[in-house]
Image (cartoon, coloured by chain):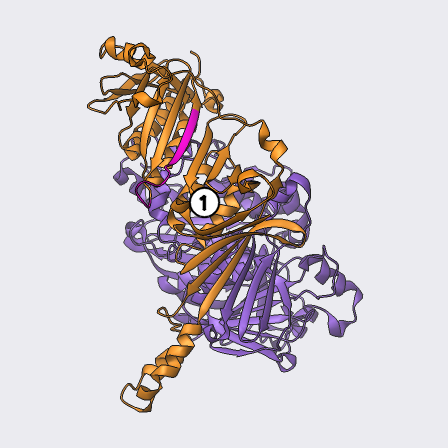
Chain colours: A orange, B purple
Amino acid sequence: MRFKTSVRNIQTFSKLTASLSSLGKVAWVRLDDDAVRFTIIPETGTQVWASLSIESIFEDYTIQSAAPNNTINLELPLPPLHRALKSAINATSASIRLTKKDGIPVLSLTIITNTMSSGNSANGFLNGANADPFGDNAFREEALDANMRDRETVVTQDIPIRVLTAVSVEGIHEPRVREPDAHIILPSLIQLKAISDRFTKLAMATTTSTKSGSSSAVAPKLELAANMHGSLKLSIATDSLNISSVWTGLTNPELDPGQIEDGDLENLPSAKLKAAGPDAWSTVRIDGRDWGKVLSVGRLGGRVIACFADEHALILYVYLSNYDDGADESVLTYYISSFSV
Amino acid sequence: MAVLTFTINPDALGKLHDALVCLGKFSEAVCLEASSDRLVLTALNSSKSAYASFTLLGNRFFSKYHYRPLRSSNQAKEKFTCKIYNKALLSVFKGRVADPSREKDTAVERCDVSVEDGEGKTKSRFVIKIVCRHGVLKTYRLTFESVAPMHALFVKESANNSWSISSKTLREFVEHFGPGTEQLDIYSEDGRVSFTSYTEKIMSGNEILKQPLHTTIAVDTLEFGEFAVEEKLHIVISVKDFKSIIAHAGITNTMVKALYSRPTSPMQLTYSEDGILSEFILMTIGESRGASATPAPNASRANSKRPASRQPLEAISSPKRAATSMPPPPTTAAPNLGREPTRARVSRPSPPPPQPSLQSEALFVTEAEDRRWDPTNFDEEEDEMLLWDTPGDKETVTMNSGHLQTSENQNRSTNGHPGLSAEDGEQSYTIPTQRLAPTQNVSEVRSSPLFVADIILISGRSEVCLIEAKKPEYSDQTTK
């Protein structure tokens, strides 16, 4: 079993781990010849199934195992990974390798930072050498250069992991959801997040004040609804208030007829909802806090399509922009169940 | 009569606060030792494996510094020593530290400290007067315990390994260390130096994922200003202590110098700036120790069993001080202080968690911007929401908050302990809090400037007061 790769895009990888770790502390990571997959299945709350093309975060990717397609399954704690990646933000290069240290399997992240330019001002070494540019030191530039090139800091971060057997992950499948009633491209996530958080706060404030603090543990439920005529509605209702925001002029993406099983676009639930007009909504009720965590994916800057299965579930597809056009797409899929009234 | 008086300007006040914060990471109590030209603040941790000291030079750090030796019998004492509960000091300076944007109306102009100690009628008090703008004067009277501090000894002559490096560079190193590790190994070979933060706790099964990050930083010796260390020598110290030191050293750009000899002998870290000399002595862990050994037990074990010459941190107390005992302050402070460790455990089940290392934005530039994507913590922000407060309102609150809060301390300390003995009670009640009702007569205002808040923080009890002072429900304001 071998796995070794360079990290191509530390920023993206770091943002990905930040977004994922808001929903769960441990991820199931499946690495194979074709893709890198992160799956988070918390006890309660939203599931994430993220499938990334290898080139979106890695390069010089080598993987080898006895399993078909060279698959390696890992259980990976996200906070240490995220912490480790922070060390790499200003790095010259970073690579990851699966190895064992003291008998414990680890993902070893090696980060190389060159400190050529920064110099060590308190050190006095460079200052002293540069003080007299026209003196004898002018001819020693080469020696200085050589010294500086050597000044390389190597940080190694070892993240403890568990290597999972193929059998143990065999039974884990993506949730099945019925054909959605509405699909819509979400507006700016930072805007959506700000308003959602505001609503959640307002609801919490009004419920805690009327019920004297005892109900603070119960997070308020946001109602999110979409129609097939470009509108998205976010609302919240408590005993004392009822507010909603409506976005209009959004896009309901066209479905690719090739993707539909019997090609019968007319009979799809979304087509029916569209036919029912702009006053026909598909609605889900979601936990305000959980929704805030989901929306933290906005930092990745992807395009988000929300699919509404009325009173049942909300699925978000977050498409990440790719390094190369035509490469496999990187998609994060969020499965959010709807609460009943 | 004041034994010691000194004045510090706001800038130095900030530095004093930084030093106290650093000392607070080692011990709950801070020891002061004043002599004619310097004031030394020290802290020794409970396992006696780490010692921190800051020497404030009389003529450079303070704007005024005067030490008047106390004459007992016929001999003048060279030094005045005492021990103060650090949280009491920190709470005095907290928030007073220069933050011109937030507290421009109550900015500190000067801080006068005088220590009164004497036999007979003089009360032993550590009096801090903070002079703010608009004539606001805040006076704090703290009790202290007259004990000689323990100093760790470090024999420079036997330390054959030394290096020095910029504190900023060290801070960058420390930022790579994740939480939860215990040891820091420093090792050098072939012109490369490695700092490894690790833990030796062995975990199994699912627990394995909770193993903290194991971090190694390998740098060129050229990063160091000076580097003269025996090749292939492993020297291990507590990573928490190291983080505490670097958090302080990294505030300014200075050169940190390390001196050490071999494992199980102490390591000294020193740096200085602007009239403050900082010195830390840390016990190093032996290579041959058992796998689960942590620095603390090691040190204490060594302390009790080993001959004096090999004690990890050899403690001495000022010889004169130990023999001639000061009259105790007229409270029962001494017994109180004696019980302090137990009290601390009772009122607060676990010791304060290790301070996270200073997270510099410099290293992780993108983080601040990225943070807006973090899930909102609704619990924390609950208080801030849906209030009518405008920024202007808040300013007014800040102006008085010091006064109000400390008054509550006072009330708390008087009322919170109904079962106290008479002398105890008397002590607490003598100086009531000056609360100015809106309609108060000018004559009732005790002294100029505008108003004076007299606060007693009884050192033995102050912990209770300080912890509970923030409770908003506090209502019992009657003073007996």
Quarter where residue A203 is shown = top left
Quarter where residue B253 is shown = bottom left
Bounds of the magenta segment:
A323-335
Name the chain letter of the residue that bears numbered label 1.
B
Give the answer, above or below, for where B306 lies relative to A140: above
Residue in the foreground of this view, choosing between B205 and B271: B205
Q: Is residue A179 left or right of residue B28?
A: left
Residue in the foreground of this view, choosing between A154 and B54: A154
Say what secondary structure mark 1 lies in.
helix
Residue B67 visible at all: no
Residue in the foreground of this view, choosing between B462 and A14: A14
Q: Is residue A50 left or right of residue A246?
A: right
Measured from the top left, where is residue B66 in percent x and y? 46, 72
**Three-letter residue code for mark 1:** Thr
Residue at the extreme left of the image, as rendered: A249
Q: Within the magenta stretch, is there residue A326?
A: yes
Residue in the foreground of this view, choosing between A304 and A219: A304
Residue at the extreme top of the image, as rendered: A276
> At x 39% / y 17%, what residue is drawn?
A285
Q: Within the magenta stretch, is there residue B106?
A: no
Measured from the top left, where is residue A247 in percent x and y? 23, 23
Residue B100 visible at all: yes
Q: Residues within 10 Å of mark 1 (few under 14, many from 20)?
A: many
Residue designated by label 1: B406
Give the answer, above or below, for where B317 lies relative to A235: below
Q: Is residue A325 left or right of residue A167?
A: left
